[in-house]
Structure formats: structure tokens, C-alpha cells
Amino acid sequence: MTTIVWFREDLRLADNPALSAAAERGALLPVYIQTEDGTRSLGGATRWWLHHSLQALMEDLGCLSLHRGDPSSILVSLARQTGATAIHWNRRYAPEAIAQDTAVKKHLAEVGLEVRSFNGALLNEPWEIATGSGSPYKVFTPFWKAARNRPVSDPLPTPTITLLQLPDDNNKLSDWELTPTTPNWAHSWTNYWQPGEAGAQARLAAFLDEDLNNYSQERDRPDLPSTSRLSPHLHFGEISPRQVHAAVNFQPFQDPMLVSGAEKFMSELGWREFSHHLLYHFPAMTTENWRPAFEAYPWRDSQQDLNAWRRGQTGYPFVDAGLRELWQTGFMHNRARMIVASFLVKHLRIHWREGEAWFWDTLVDADIANNAAGWQWVAGSGADAAPYFRIFNPIVQGQKFDPNGAYVRRWCPELAELDTRFIHAPWEASPMELSAAGIILGKSYPYPIVDHREARAAALEGYQIIKAT
């Protein structure tokens, strides 16, 4: 029996339930359909990653049928051309994706095609974890405790595949123009990333060998290469959570000293699960405040400040370093993300939606659930959110998590020669010290666009309005 496998956010061969089940039935046709009808358009960074990930998948499979347009009509047409009797895919959980998949499944069933969907993206699907009363979890810690008590099945091996010949109407990947050209702002990204299943496995292996041991102590240090950088691979499904779960949890059996790092890293994977849990049960959280009281917050509308933030020109080096890392690599360390996001919503008092949209366009790991949950957590408007009164001091954060200034010096090279005492607050250096470092504040590096104390006071005043509603 012939099966069509519709690839989406599962661009891998190993531990791919839809692919493995199709391979057991007989010959199969692997298909990828570029469709943004009803779903959120990809950002520029994720389009770049998608191009390279699809290229890698085509090489791993030997072929991949590429199409653009309406999935229902394309899949029916392909089934008629190939004689396929079934369509397989792995489930997605964003509200628009669920709506699209539901409509496609209904149409395919109406024309007599068998449709099977699988969980290839999460350890536990959003409806499988519930409180004692049957309601969704709204706090991470009890959610993750419940999730950790559930067994996780072993990842599936790479199946033996018998491929069908590609239909004649196949598209070329280059026709989709997913990568930037004029200008090619991603020209150096291949120095940082290897999209594809092989790259994902190599990244996991390197993390386990080099960084897991110190992960719990060093994960908040953006100046150190101590994080997994697996998030884009997970988002595009080049590696599955089950594969990561199995590999990470095996480490303490080899070395008991790795227990702390393994548990801490698994909790980060748990936050990804929690974000999808929230999105499934509260689909409006991508655009609306999870806590309605935040509708009363007096947000500022300042395009000038927003542009300075986007460009990494706020005058706060730790903030600027994070935003410049993002622009130059398509990625930002998680601690820097927290400080950068906090600065936008609490120092500049610009709505979290503006930051969420910027991250969506510029992050290679832009994920609709993680992005919305993260931004609302920082803003204080989300589930299990940071307290409204927690306003990160970007100077103190820099001193604590980039103590030698290596992160700032890398991404803000105009500050490279400044003494470490002033690297996170250049305006505190004397004119002689600035001159010796080749810095002219206001020219080679900006003055702070807002005073920390004044910004903190204004943010707290705004939050008093929320408390009064």
C-alpha cells in the first residue's frame, strides 16, 4: 500500500512516527507543502533555516516532493497520481495549524483517503496533562512535576524506506526564494549553524560531551558556550524531544555527577512543553494579554526608542550585545533574551507585542508558543509570569552574568578596550578612560536612551494602574 507523508515541523528521519508508520505500509511519497494560508507567515530568519533544513532532508531522503498552495487539493491530486490510499503527518499545536489540519483531514476523508496523525513534536501532548480537577495547568512547576511522572516511550529508529518516483509537477527549492539576497544579511550564518538532522545530532552530542556537566552552573552566562543551542533544531523537528530526553537522561547512569545538569536541562525542555500546553488551552495568548488586567497598562508608543532597541543602540551594553548577537547570528542567549525583553517592556514601556514580532522575524528558533509565553512571562501578563515589580537592572545583570565583559566586547566591539569596571556602564568612566578606549559617547557608542531609576519608577507607576483595575 502506498502512503503520502506530509512533512511540516518534523524534518527528520529518525523518531518520526508518521514516516515510520508509512514505511511499514509499503512505498511512500515524502511531501512538503509551502502554505501560509491561515497560518502565520514565517519570519526572515526561519525562512533561511527552512531552506537549509529542507535541502538537508532532501539529501537524507533521496527525494522530496515540493509544492506550494492549498494542502487539500495538492494531497488529493498527488494521491490520484500515485495511487496512494493514505496520508500521514505529525500533529501541530498552534491554533491556526490545528484549524488547517482539521479542514484538510475532513476533505481527505470525504474523498476516501485514510488519514493518520501522530505525536512527533512533544513528550506529552497538551491535552494529556491536567490538574486533579481536569483543568489545564497555569503554573510551570506542578505542570512539569506531573509531566515528569509520565513515562516517555523510546525514540524510533530510522526506518527502511521504499520511495515512489516524484511526480512531474515538482517544484525546485530555489524557486521559493527563502534565503535573503539583497542584502544577504545571513551570509555568515553557516558559520554558526548546521541546519538538518545531522547538524541536530552533532549539536546534541557536543552539548552532552562538553557542556552538560556545568550546565546548571553556567547556563546563565552568555559569555560562555554552555547552552545546547538545540532550540531551532527542535522547532523544525530535526531532532525530537524524545531523542533529547533519552540521550540526556542516560547521562547520569554513566556519570552520577551529571544529575544536576541533566535535571536542569530537562526543565528547560519542560518549559517548551508548558508553552505548547498553554497555547493549546489559551490560543489567544499570541496576541492578547493572558491576564486581562494588563489591558489597562499605559504602554508608550515610541518608534524612535523601538528602533534603537532593535538596532542594539540603547546605550546599555548588555542589552545591546544581546540584540546585536540576534541580528548577526539569528540567535540570542536565553539570559540575554530576558534582559532585552524586560528592557523593552519595563524600561521603555513598549508593548510586548512589538518585541514578540521582532523576535518572530529575527530568531532562527522563532516558535509561536515559546515566543508568546516568554514575552508574556517577562511582561508579567502571562501564566506563571515574573512579578510585575521584578525589573531587571541591565547594569547589574551584565556584571553578574558577563563579569569579564567578554559578551559585550564580542558583540559591541566599539567598547572592547574599555576597562572591565565600566564595560556595563560606559558613562561612569572618566573622559580620560573613555578616550584611552577610543570611545566618544554619543558618537561611537550612544548614551543611555533612558535612565534606569526613572524608567523603573515609571514602570512601577504603570503597574499601580493594573492593580487598581
Image: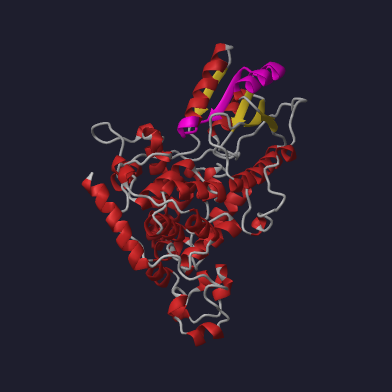
Q: Which x, y percent locates residue 142? A: 28, 45
Q: Residue furthest right?
A: 168
Reply above or below: 158 against 316.
above
Left or right of residue 131: residue 352: right
* Residue 93 shown in magenta: yes
In this view, the residue in front, 95 or 54, is 95
Q: Which residue is at the front of the view, 353 or 60?
A: 353
The relative height of residue 80 versus residue 30 in the rendered view (above or below) is above
Which quadrant of the figure has residue 76? top right
Vertically, is 116 above or below 135? Answer: above
Residue pictured at 43% horizontal, 62% vertical: 219
User: Residue 112: x percent and y percent?
Assistant: 58, 12
Q: Horizontal placement of 307 versus 282: left or right?
A: right
Confirm whether residue 32 shows in the render: yes
Residue at the image position 44 percent from the left and 46 percent from the top: 353
Pick out the residue farthest to the left: 468
Q: Is residue 403 shown in magenta?
A: no
Q: Quadrant of residue 20?
A: top right
Instruction: Tell me where the magenta segment starts and ends, as one range.
Output: 72-96
Q: Residue at x 28, y 43 (%)?
A: 293
